[in-house]
Image (cartoon, helix red, strand yellow):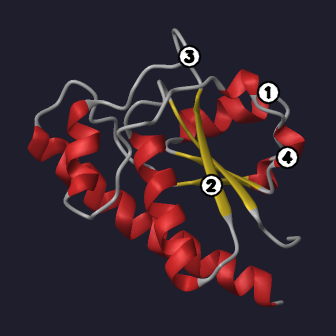
Amino acid sequence: MARIKNVLFVCTGNTCRSPMAQAIFCDISKKEKLGCVGESAGIAVGAEGRAATAQAVKALERLGIDISQHKSKSVRSIKPEEFDLFVAMTEDHAEMLMNLGVPKNKIYIMNIPDPFGGSQEIYDLCCKSIISETERLAELIKKNNEQ
């Protein structure tokens, strides 16, 4: 795979998982000097410009990461050619991306269940899963970019 610089994280509404993953990834990228930029979008965004859920904001506050200014956007408003890698939260998101013309070899799947509507504890567990998956992704990108 070519050098990865621009990464798009994709979930359903772009108010929970993908904004958390984007922020965590950007934090790791900065600390690890990966030179990558992360963005996020949703497959089924009702109205663009919605804030991240309060639980997602709180889960990341504990890590010293602020997503309080996040505004949701639809995957349909982005230009796929601007991204080197698409990170889908589930297999369904990956399939929808492929239906939009994203090549399968440019999609990485995290398999993170949707916490929307859940308690703070569920969001905190979701955040831990995202951290683990994002650290794994950062290692893969680092290896890819060193080749």
What residue type is disc 4 on?
Glu
* Foreground tag (1 vs 2): 2
What residue type is disc 1 on?
Leu
Q: Secondary structure at mark 1?
A: loop
Determine the CA span between mark 2 and mark 4.
11 Å
Determine the CA span between mark 2 and mark 3.
18 Å
Instruction: Say which label, 1 or 3, has the lower sequence index.
Output: 3
Residue 16 appears left or right of 19: left
Q: Quadrant of residue 35?
A: bottom right
Q: Where 118 falls versus 102 (above or below)?
A: above
Residue beneath disc 2: 38
Mark 1 Cα-neighbour bin, 10 Å: few <14, some 14–19, many ≥20:
few
Q: Secondary structure at mark 4?
A: helix
* Residue at screen point 50% across, 81% down: 31
What residue type is disc 3 on?
Glu
Instruction: Say which label, 1 or 2, has the lower sequence index.
Output: 2
